[in-house]
Image: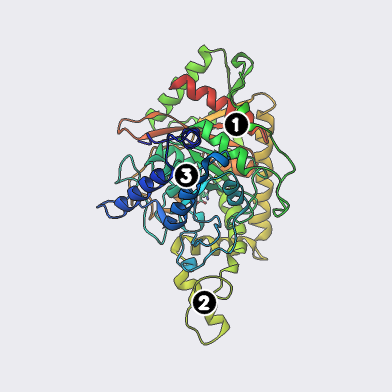
């Protein structure tokens, strides 16, 4: 899978004239079309930016000697909850089917400034709620490794588009694991940056205190290039932090002294419920690290058992507030009605899918006057305790290693009727969002069905560069 070009290969190829951007873009567009017409399509895209992508590619080929940019001519797929001017932003929902973005998200502005080409908008779970990409109004996404299986979610289209080589790299969003979990299922690299490091301006909000945009790529180097470009302070996002890492992607190559590194293995993340071959693959990596001098320490993150319940109070609470703007008046769909109340009612009834409705109801319930203290406030307190767990752990270790997911990619239809079971697929990723720190999933092997296995490395807040350097080092040790 994903044998295609990496970012640096494309940029170097185009700059030297060895690679035609037009041919590259045309090849990807052809692949996307062929997939659409195939019997079991991967269905990674909701919108293909065909005309614009071809136009940009031709312009780049014609002017390549005078152009520069860290993404010059690189076709990038963008999750369909991130605004790209002139293209629909559907969020995988019927309610936004006809909504066209009037401006670029900050991350898109930055990509374009570096010469990146948006090849299309990727399929996703509706409003980024889900772990399997089965809740999209635009159909399920299939895993490129096995088309009877899910690609993970909610950035399933973004992960599948990279794994299936329909683009060079992609952007996803991660509220509780939606970059890392699909990256693990699709055998690609997925990075959730520290909260506040990447602007959320132009990302349709789900859980505002949890959401981060991040890269999904073929290797760690590409993730560092994209992070370098999309990160940085943005006055348009009030949660954006005045923090920058200069030359992030060049500094990736800095040598690290492995004998100075301590890795923590939290006992709560290595239990009997985890698929055997996932544990085996991760243990193999740990052994390699130990043989290179890394110190490994068993640690405990005891509050982890409350992470899923806490997340499923905080995230729906924020979602119910954020999604109230989709009312049939301001954006997208408007259903026939005789009164204002009916506009709301009819539009939301047909516009939202089942999972989104479930979350809105849950969110309104935990925020309602009678239950606010018992649920929402309590969840915020537990969130602080989870943060304290991590703070304590990070006073003893530099990184925490866990499986990204308890299983490899499951079958389409296997969990969709059981929301609780679906929610549990994020058990190892949600804590990171509740804490607000950075984490990456890298592929570390295959299971007995030849399905990819992901390993999660969690770093200290704003030590995204250190995290990438360590991940880069592991990647080279195991490849
Ligand atoms: N799967 C989780 C959920 O359904 C996380 C989603 C996400 O990170 N966007 O909420």
At x 66%, y 45%, the residue is 382
Report the front residue among 240 and 111. 111
Q: Residues within 10 Å of mark 1 (few under 14, many from 20)?
A: many
The extreme left residue here reads 39
Q: Picture coordinates of residue 288 (x, y %)?
A: 48, 16
Scheme of colours in the image? rainbow
Q: Is residue 292 left or right of residue 418?
A: right
In the displayed structure, 180 sits above or below 414; it is: above
- Identify the mark nearer the N-term, 1 or 2: 1
Kindly report which numbered mark, 2 or 3, lies closer to the viewer in this rendering: 3
Residue 335 in percent (x, y) is at 48, 78
Helix, strand or loop at mark 1: helix
Q: Quadrant of the C terminus?
A: top left
Dot 2: few (<14), some (14–19), or many (≥20) neighbours within 10 Å?
A: some
Mark yes or no: residue 459 visible. no
Label 1 and label 3: CA atoms lie apart by 25 Å
Task: Decide if residue 248 is on the left or right side of residue 453.
Answer: right
Q: Which residue is mark 2?
A: 345
**What distance separates the C-alpha of mark 2 from that of mark 3?**
51 Å
Distance from the alpha carbon under mark 1 to that under mark 2:
49 Å
Q: Is residue 218 above or below residue 253?
A: below
Which residue occupies the foreground of this view, 39 or 389? Answer: 39
Q: Which residue is mark 3?
A: 61
In this rendering, the label closer to the viewer, 1 or 3: 3
Q: Is mark 3 within 8 Å of ligand 1?
A: no
Is residue 215 visible to the viewer in this orientation of the structure? yes
Instruction: Label 3, secondary structure: give it.
Output: helix
Q: Secondary structure at mark 2?
A: helix
Q: Which residue is mark 1?
A: 249
Residue 205, compared with residue 426, is above or below; it is below
């Amino acid at each position: 899978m994903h044998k295609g070009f990496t970012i640096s290969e494309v940029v170097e190829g185009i700059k030297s004239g060895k690679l035609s951007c037009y041919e590259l873009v045309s090849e990807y567009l052809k692949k996307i079309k062929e997939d659409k017409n195939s019997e079991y399509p991967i269905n990674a895209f909701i919108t293909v930016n065909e005309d614009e992508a071809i136009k940009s590619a031709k312009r780049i080929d014609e002017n390549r000697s005078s152009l520069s940019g860290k993404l010059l001519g690189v076709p990038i797929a963008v999750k369909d909850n991130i605004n790209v001017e002139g293209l629909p932003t559907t969020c995988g929902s019927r309610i936004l089917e006809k909504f066209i973005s009037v401006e670029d998200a900050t991350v898109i502005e930055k990509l374009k400034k570096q010469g990146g080409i948006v090849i299309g908008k990727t399929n996703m779970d509706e409003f980024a709620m889900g772990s399997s990409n089965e809740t999209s109004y635009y159909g399920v996404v299939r895993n490129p490794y096995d088309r009877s299986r899910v690609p993970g979610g909610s950035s399933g289209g973004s992960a599948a588009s990279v794994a299936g080589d329909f683009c060079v790299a992609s952007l996803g969003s991660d509220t509780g694991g939606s970059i890392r979990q699909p990256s693990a299922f699709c055998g690609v690299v997925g990075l959730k940056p520290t909260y506040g490091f990447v602007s959320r301006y132009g990302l349709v909000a789900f859980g505002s205190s949890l959401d981060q945009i991040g890269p999904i790529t073929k290797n760690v180097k590409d993730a560092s290039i994209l992070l370098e470009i999309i990160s940085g302070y943005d006055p348009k996002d009030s949660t954006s932090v005045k923090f920058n890492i200069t030359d992030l992607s060049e500094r990736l190559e800095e040598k690290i002294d492995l004998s100075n590194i301590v890795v923590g293995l939290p006992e709560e993340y290595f239990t009997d419920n985890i698929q055997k071959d996932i544990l085996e693959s991760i243990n193999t990596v740990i052994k390699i690290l130990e043989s290179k001098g890394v110190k490994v320490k068993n640690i405990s993150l005891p509050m982890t058992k409350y992470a899923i319940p806490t997340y499923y109070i905080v995230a729906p609470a924020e979602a119910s507030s954020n999604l109230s703007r989709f009312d049939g008046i301001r954006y997208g769909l408007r259903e026939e009605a005789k009164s204002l109340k009916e506009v709301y009612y009819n539009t939301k009834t047909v516009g939202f899918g089942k999972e989104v409705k479930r979350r809105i109801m849950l969110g309104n319930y935990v925020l309602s006057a009678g239950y606010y203290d018992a649920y929402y406030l309590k969840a915020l307190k537990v969130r602080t305790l989870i943060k304290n767990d991590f703070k304590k752990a990070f006073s003893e270790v530099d990184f925490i290693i866990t499986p990204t997911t308890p299983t490899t990619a499951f079958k389409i239809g296997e969990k969709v009727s059981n929301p609780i079971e679906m929610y549990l697929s994020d058990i190892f990723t949600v804590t990171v969002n509740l804490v607000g720190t950075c984490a990456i999933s890298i592929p570390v092997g295959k299971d007995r069905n030849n399905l990819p296995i992901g390993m999660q490395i969690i770093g200290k807040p704003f030590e995204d560069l250190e995290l990438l350097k360590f991940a880069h080092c592991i990647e080279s040790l195991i490849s």
